Image: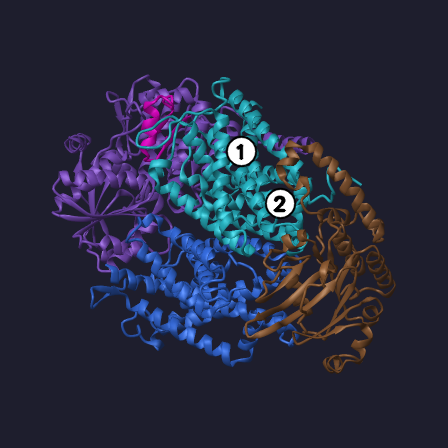
Chain colours: A blue, B cyan, C brown, D purple
Amino acid sequence: MLLQHIADGVLSGAVVALGAIGLSFAMKILRFANFSHSELLTWGAYFALVFLGFTTAFSDFFGGNIGPLSFGWPLLIAMVLSAVATSVLALVLHALVFEKLGRGAGHMTMVFASFGIALLLRHVVVLIWGPNPIYYSNELQFAVLLPGNVRVMPDQVFLLGLTIVLVVSLHLFMTRSRAGIAMRGVSENPDLARVSGVNVDNVVRWVWVIGASMAAIAGVLYGLTVQLRPELGFGLILPLFAAAILGGAGSMYGAVIGGLVVGLSENLSVMIIPTTYKPAVPFLLILLILYFRPDGLFGERR
Amino acid sequence: MIGVISYLVFFLILALIFSIAVLGLNLQWGYTGLFNAGVAGFIAVGAYTMAIMTGPSREAVMGGFELPFVVGLLGAMCTAGFAALVVGLITLRLKDEYLAVATFGIAVTIQLVCLNWEYVTGGTLGLISIPNPAKPLTDGPLAQNSVFLLIVVGVGGIAFWSLERIVQSPWGRMLKAIREDADAAASLGKSPTRIRLESFVLGCMLMGLSGALYVAFIGYVSPSDFLPIVTFQIWTMLIVGGSANNRGAVLGAIIVWGVWTSSGYVISKLVPTEIQAQGGAMQAVLIGLILVLMLLCRPRGLIGERMNVSRHARI
Amino acid sequence: MTATVSGSQTVLQLEGVTKRFGGFTAVDNVSFDLPAGTIGGLIGPNGAGKTTLFNTLAGMIQLDAGQVVLNRTPIHTLPPHQIFKAGLARTFQIPRPFREMTVLENVMTAPANQAGEKFWNNLLRPRKVAREEQALREQALSIIDFCDLSRVSADAAASLSGGQLKLLELARVLMSEPEIILLDEPAAGVNPSLMVTLVDKITELNRRGYTFLIIEHNMDVVMSICDPIMVMARGRLIYHGDAAGARQDPAVLDAYLGDLP
Amino acid sequence: MFIRQLSAALAFAALFFGGMAHAADCPVKLGGVLPVSGPMGQVGERISTTGQFAVDHFNAAGGVKGCDVEYVLRDTQGQSTVGVDAAKSLVDLEGVQALIGAVSSGVSLPILTSVAVPSEITQVSCCSSSESFTELAKSGDTNGYWFRTYATNRSQSAMGALLTTKSDFKKTAVIYVNTDFGVGLAKRFEQDIPKLGGSITKMVAYNESQQSYRAEVTSALEGNPDSLFLVAFPVDGATITREWLALGGTDNLIVNNSLRSTDYFEAVGTKYLQNLQGYDSAQPRLPSVATFNELFEAEFDGPPNGPGLHSVYDAVTVVLLAMEASDEITGANIRDNIRKVTSVDGEEVYPGPEGIKRAKALIAEGKTIRYVGATGALSFDENGDVQAPKMTWKLEGDENIETAYYTEKEVAELIIKLDN
């Protein structure tokens, strides 16, 4: 069972990792704890559902499922479109609310506004798509038995692989592209970056786009391996924050490692504590990190 | 007409019980700028303390001390304050957002503990038969509720009066200085960590008090009383009423609770039964919208902060 | 390096103060003494590390090496609020008033260890607090008057002009009668007439016995009121002496080349 | 200053609510406090429409004492504070003398203790299963104002255990919802199953409304169980079942009554549920039930599968019959007459407009009646609890098929056997 819990932990940690990247950047560069970030996962998942509806019209053209996976090209296309749509949503929120508040009030007012927006976004999902769970496909995918008596679903392995690919591409983006380098600059020293002629407004928009895209993809993959429901993101708030804080705000790799640690500890915890206490595990992790390493495992000590 | 009065008394009891928690939050957010996202958790701590201290003895559950009402109130404040002290000591020296995340987490955890630690909290069954202090004094629901309203007004009045005294004092001045600029306050010899801790603990004690009054009134406590939405309601009350103003906090509690309950009434009248599930979501969207718009357009709420110097030194 | 503590006359003494950010050394092994009753001027081009040094002295940034001694007491290990209580007060380059509080409130906040700062005193010993508040108010009003802020004393600090904010910060630190006052660019962004007032206030206070350490870019101000003058460049202290000497020092000229018109 | 604001608020509120309060004799009002939105919204919504359905039947039969019945529904949002306030406003402002609700015990209980009992209003719940109600009633704190048309956990766990052992399952894992309902049921099940020759491999509780239950499922898979006893509600139940099956869990599933729901079958996919078995209260082979089912299907284009539908219908009908039998419609009279319209030696009457017409005629003649409803013959014990007949069911294709029927007597005997 230990191996199974580890496998489950790594796989569910991958979703948390993807979602936490955006949150981590937001905490460092936008300088506020964005409680509405997790709702972007929900919206990403539901956007993909809409686009999937369009693409299924062409399903003959795309052929069936890819290999052992439970989905075909339409879902992947829907996922990319959903990332775009979620980015637009995030930019709209930024322009309508956070930009204004950030200029006037303190950053804690932004935290609070993010609370309100989270509630708003969650219930708009209920209004549009209804409160009941929805599945991308009603087919059930059965797990494959691996050596060591570990069962994993092919979709989840795909999820892990895609996470790795995304993190590597993000790394290249951050180190090679102008926008990425500017982002790192602002993240490390905003004042210095500003006087060196970096367009901070642009960087902020990039942060929203990257964060929202990663969140959308995480949402789609999460929805794919389980289901879509309006509380999809809400239930992930604490794991996401735990991952971002664990990794150290602003550190991409930190967020990824943080996500995996959160996933593993949640899944392994059920071996020692009753499953009903599992949702508290990320919180305990947060307390431990804040107590011993307030700047995260990979954050620089102030 | 008796019905209307009876309902108003009932409504006011709940609204004023909430307003005590809002006052606590006002101390934390309005005066000190502390973001407590776990209000429901601290209310729960107070509520269960009250239930355990004043409730009858039960099988397989701790407690049954049957202590007097007032002792229960004080005990509830102490345990909520203690919980706040622990969280505060860990997070208050850190960046502001961490308090928001940690308090959000503690509310989730406290709810889980309420749900699962059967020996103390009765688990999912909750704790029943918590004595109502108004019951031995009078007969009839209206008379009893009126007496209870007096008790709430009395307790809330003491809390209100004490808060007014201490926020319009050098201590309150420090809170606001910390809220405005913690670094600048530190450069003037104030210890942000200590002051934040004091404000946080005091605020949470009021939340505990509010929880204690709630269970004494309802007579029953269960984990489902402390869903995250409660935190959200308390926050909306403060923002609508006006932060950094205790009158605003009380007014906000009455208005928001009024809107919340009457919008349920309106929805039940106007929206057909078939789509009332959507009606509930509409209500949440509406409240979320009011909140965000309030922050954008009228961040000070209905009654904003009053400029003052000190009770002793008006110009 | 300064060799010995020069008796009771030295208020502030820095020894090998060093602060690094990552690989960048913002303050590099800075040492000097500031005698009591002087107005020290700290100058240097942008990015020389002056404000970082101030932040280190005030305890807002932990130093990496060296020590800071205030009246024979090492203060570099203390948190900011205790450094203030020890007698070192500072203002900020960009003023940081308590914006939503009145000018009088801002000033009355400053003194440390007020009885009313313990919340229970306000409930249990209200008379004592009231007496103290009365005294504080008298003191605050006279300082506000000295700083020419009487007209605005009931206004929110947020409504003040840049120059008035500089005066407000000065008034705030004066409440506690500190051993030494650190002013970060007092003349920056202040209109000329107010600047004259400000310089007058500083010299007047200096005559009354206050010690200052001032960062300033306005050379007229520095040369007219400061002595000694310390020059920093790229984190190092490159000159320590009188104003006349600074004008001729080759290292100073070199550092300012391109910075000065 | 403050007092002025407060009194202004009060005056405003009085004006606002004052206009709404009118206590005329017609129509007769019945209050519903149900979770139409919130976590239980899906369940609550169907329950509330079925409540309206029962009221419609009564009105079709001429209403109560010639008055139309108005069913005033208020949403609890699944929150106790909102529920309590809703109940109080129904009582004080609408003047209702009986309340239907709520669903969760955590909402029904505070309504009972702070509204119904002090205001002397009869409260009938379709769905609250907590043992706390029985305890409260025994201690005399309900004054008899509490009833529920939902059979308590005791018989449910017994049926689950019986079904499991009758199918020759030896090693059963239990996944149950972490609420008073789930915990109570699962704990009883754990005690019952060894007495019938089965055994438990693992007990796993889960918290409601989580996105994924992978960790819970993996834990439950320990010890290679040959069957799973699942105590859940449709939404989370579907998630758990899907993850259970995907991770290689056995498809020998035994489920509680709330999973006898089309939502659940469709979400999981009926083709994966062909070895699923379940039990339910009372779909007895009585004409009354058939009548109800037919009427329901005609109205809603689907069978009444789902938690609380049968029982809310009976809750509403019993209350309305009790009103009909009262000289004056007060909470106390309703309380007393509920027993008169369900008395064991009365003449049997059935649901639907026709049945109710007959019942009204009998009441008018002064005869005692026995309402045999959608859940069968209701007989409330002194604590307001009912015992109901039980049935077991399974899926065959998309069809939900009854496999066995247990009368109240057989259920009672089973419980006695298990308790000794």
Q: Residue D47, located in which quarter of the rendered image?
A: top left
Left or right: B260 with respect to D379?
right
Left or right: C221 with respect to D162?
right
- At x 58%, y 37%, the residue is B19
Q: Looking at the picture, does residue D374 appear above or below residue C101?
A: above
Task: Name the image quarter holding the N terminus of chain D.
Answer: top right
Q: Chain of mark 2?
A: B
Counting the numbered discs, the total is: 2
Q: Which structural element holds mark 1?
A: helix
Residue B263 pos. (x, y %): 55, 41
Examine the rendering and report whether any part of residue B211 can be seen: no
Residue D355 pos. (x, y %): 31, 30
In magenta, the rendered stretch is: D122-148
Examine the rendering and report whether any part of residue A18 can be seen: yes
Q: Which residue is mark 1?
A: B14
Q: Which structural element holds mark 2?
A: helix
Which amino acid type is shown beneath numbered disc 1?
Leu
Q: Which residue is mark 2?
A: B240
Residue A130 pos. (x, y %): 43, 53
